[in-house]
Amino acid sequence: MNFKELMEFDKQIVEKYMDELLSINVIYEKKLIESMKYSVQAGGKRLRPILFLETIKLLNKNPFDFIEIACAIEMIHTYSLIHDDLPAMDNDSLRRGKPTNHVVFGEATAILAGDGLLNLAHEIMIAFVSKKLTKNNINGINIISKAAGINGMIAGQAVDIESEGKSIDIDTMKFIHSNKTGALIEASIVAAAIMSDADDTRIAALKTYAKYIGLAFQITDDILDIEGNEAELGKKIGSDELNDKATYPKYFGLEKSKEYAKNTITNAIESLNVFEPREKAFFVDLADYIICRKK
Ligand code: GRG
């Protein structure tokens, strides 16, 4: 399979398995489950679960043995999007090409749908380790949990919200982005490496790669918010400027940001030198995709 086929193959597996995990029969809380499904099934690139599954494969383990962890990561990501779109946060009305969760289901249900997805992800991860109890599996889910929490994504989001309309220094901006966006991307790769029992050299190489692609992903996201096409992106552009967000183009300008993203991708690819060319082919293509993407 070439890069595009692999991305599509992994995406379909993750989507199918998430559908199964969300086939929950309830009597009273039908609206809650429907709103959770609405955002999960709205599409999305499924980048984080794909990174997780491909890392497992790179390290010669069977990705199907870890599929529920990939789904849990995507549920955490989807929860963060639902909450990020709320009026109290970024107040967006379009996500993944569809009206945002609170626009369709109301704010209270959207908040609960996010909470439900975050908690379900942890229920899934705990059920996984209780069946497959190894030190590396525990360490892996611990990395995912932490990346989603107050030492990762939630911290980045909190500082992002507090910084709106204020002038902040570059280090604060980097803190926001490496936590809000970078932490879960990095955890998707590092947790998979640890759960695949990789050696320290390989884990370190993949961690460095993950940091670089997380950074390039964010810079590209900032650029797309200025130059992207709303129909292709599936969300409104110009929202960073509207919310007076600290972005790479705001600090460095558009052209310098593009150059920065390109150099970051070169560094990401170089950090995989410990792997054979045929082993790392997917990750090299993915690094290029991160900055060439249109959505
Ligand atoms: C609410 C705790 C909490 C965190 C929110 C995810 C997030 C943190 C904010 C979203 C705002 C944003 C545009 C961040 C930039 C990078 C990013 C995470 C983009 C969305 O991820 P994609 O492009 O989305 O992977 P899809 O829809 O493809 O899954």
Image (cartoon, grey):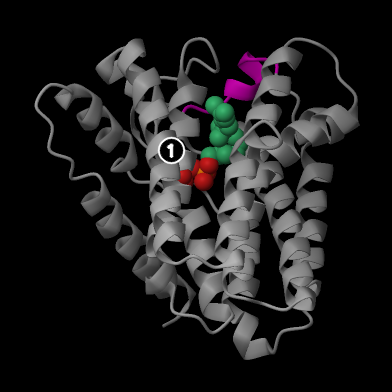
Q: Specify the quarter for ligand 1.
A: top right
Compared across the picture, whether 123 is left or right of 272 comes to left
Rendering coords of residue 155 (x, y %): 70, 28
The residue segment tinted magenta is 236-244
Rendering coords of residue 14 (x, y %): 35, 59
Report the quarter where the N terminus lies: bottom left
Residue found at x 12% / y 38%:
25
Compared across the picture, whether 26 is left or right of 237 comes to left
Where is mark 1, residue-wise? 78
The answer to whether 198 is drawn above or below residue 28 in the figure is below
Residue found at x 47% / y 57%:
49
The answer to whether 38 is drawn above or below residue 215 in the figure is above
Query: In front here: 275 or 289?
Result: 275
Give the structural element (helix, strand or loop) at label 1: helix
Direction left: furthest residue = 27
- The answer as to whether callout 1 falls within 8 Å of ligand 1 is yes
Q: Is residue 248 magenta?
A: no
Residue type beneath disc 1: Thr
Rendering coords of residue 265 (x, y %): 75, 62
